């Protein structure tokens, strides 16, 4: 992995480390999604789910770690920044044995090892470019993590797109295909880390007040209509259009280990520091294996 990408991620974590209060509304929404998912998976048994995977865990301010230890037996934190994850676990004052940190990990591998040369579309580099796109869209899970009940992507997708934009501009001939490959790859990797019947929760910010000042005035009653208009106006982060994600999930649903059901949440407004972010989530349940029952027909006895 490139040291500049890793250090940039660590710097962002350091900058947001003191913004715990700014995450409160966002954290509440994410925790509601997790709690309702656990209830759906367990029913009224009152037990814990076996494991949870947090992709892009970072400082873990998107979630309430102490509460998660009440819902899951094991929690896997996956990120580039091992120091941030260690600090988050220590701050939670929970049972350290319930946490496993996986860092530094490129969950969009090989994205963080690429240079702009790898994505050149010219004839002399076309074969290499195709190999890179195939690798970005491949089903590469974090191998040391057992299949989990729940996998959550914590607004890490837009960070992946930021990395892509630092490699090639949006008008680059390869940009659209690379963006789609990263999105498909991320969804496939989330699904591959789930046990059959498990649930992936894809959380992403989709627009910022930096280009849409109206988000500063958004409320729970108005945010959905505002996001719809921002999509119409194409004023959103590249790759986060909910319609495109649904189209990708529809394609993946044709696979044996693809999505069984997909639910989209209403968007919510997230005020962080001086920005307002429009945020939403998909709740994706993985298919159960198809049981093939073969019944032997009665064979008449020969005379």
Image (spheres, rainbow, N blue to C red):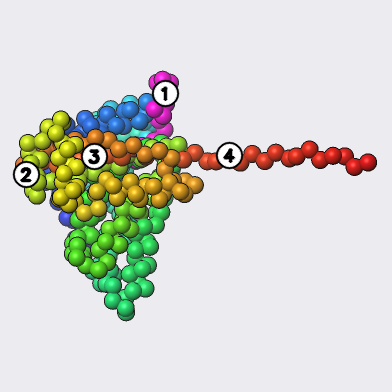
Which of the labelled discs sits on residue 64, or is there none?
A: none
Q: In the displayed structure, would residue 66 be above or below residue 235?
A: above
> Of all residues shown, which one is farthest toward the bottom?
124
Of label 4 and label 3, which has the lower sequence position? 3
Query: Where does label 3 land, which residue?
Result: 280
Q: CA distance from mark 3 to mark 2?
A: 18 Å
Of label 3 and label 1, which has the lower sequence position? 1
Q: In the displayed structure, would residue 166 be above or below residue 301?
A: below
Membership of 50 in magenta stretch = yes
Query: Where does label 2 land, which residue?
Result: 213
The reply to whether discs 4 and 1 touch (Cβ–Cβ < 8 Å) is: no
The reply to whether discs 3 and 1 touch (Cβ–Cβ < 8 Å) is: no
Residue neighbourhood size for the residue with mark 2, other residues' Cα within 10 Å, grouped as few (<14), some (14–19), many (≥20)? few
Query: Where does label 4 land, which residue?
Result: 291
Of label 3 and label 2, which has the lower sequence position? 2
Which one is closest to the eye, mark 2 or mark 4? 2
Which one is closest to the eye, mark 3 or mark 1? 3
Q: Position of residue 300 (x, y in %)?
A: 84, 39
Residue at disc 2, secondary structure: helix
Which one is closest to the eye, mark 4 or mark 1? 4
Residue at disc 1, secondary structure: loop
Q: CA distance from mark 3 to mark 1?
A: 25 Å
Q: Could you tell me which residue is drawn at 43 percent across and 40 percent down?
A: 260
What range of the chain is rendered magenta?
40-54
Query: In this orientation, which residue lies closer to the viewer: 262 or 188?
Result: 262
Q: CA distance from mark 2 to mark 1?
A: 42 Å
Query: Where does label 1 land, which residue?
Result: 43
Q: CA distance from mark 4 to mark 1?
A: 23 Å
Which one is closest to the eye, mark 2 or mark 1? 2
Residue neighbourhood size for the residue with mark 1, other residues' Cα within 10 Å, grouped as few (<14), some (14–19), many (≥20)? few
* Quadrant holding the N terminus: bottom left
């Amino acid at each position: 992995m490139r040291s500049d990408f890793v250090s940039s991620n660590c710097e962002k974590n350091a900058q947001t480390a003191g913004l715990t209060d700014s995450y409160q509304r966002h954290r509440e929404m994410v925790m509601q999604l997790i709690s309702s998912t656990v209830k759906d998976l367990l029913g009224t048994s009152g037990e814990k789910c076996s494991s949870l995977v947090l992709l892009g865990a970072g400082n873990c301010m998107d979630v309430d770690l102490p509460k998660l230890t009440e819902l899951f037996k094991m929690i896997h934190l996956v990120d580039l920044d091992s120091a941030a994850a260690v600090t988050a676990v220590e701050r939670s004052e929970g049972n350290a044995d319930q946490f496993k940190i996986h860092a530094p990990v490129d969950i969009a591998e090989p994205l963080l090892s690429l240079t702009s040369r790898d994505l050149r579309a010219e004839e002399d580099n076309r074969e290499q470019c195709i190999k890179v796109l195939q690798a970005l869209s491949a089903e590469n899970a974090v191998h040391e993590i057992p299949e989990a009940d729940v996998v959550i992507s914590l607004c890490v997708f837009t960070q992946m797109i930021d990395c892509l934009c630092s490699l090639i501009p949006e008008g680059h001939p390869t940009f659209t295909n690379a963006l789609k490959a990263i999105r498909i790859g991320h969804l496939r990797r989330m699904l591959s880390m789930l046990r059959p019947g498990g649930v992936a929760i894809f959380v992403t910010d989709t627009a910022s007040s930096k280009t849409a000042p109206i988000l500063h005035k958004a409320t729970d009653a108005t945010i959905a209509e505002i996001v719809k208009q921002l999509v119409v106006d194409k004023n959103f982060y590249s790759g986060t259009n909910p319609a495109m994600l649904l189209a990708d999930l529809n394609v993946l649903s044709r696979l044996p280990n693809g999505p069984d059901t997909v639910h989209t949440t209403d968007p919510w407004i997230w005020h962080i520091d001086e920005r307002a972010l429009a945020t939403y989530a998909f709740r994706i349940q993985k298919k159960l294996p198809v049981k093939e029952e073969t019944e032997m027909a009665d064979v008449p006895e020969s005379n």
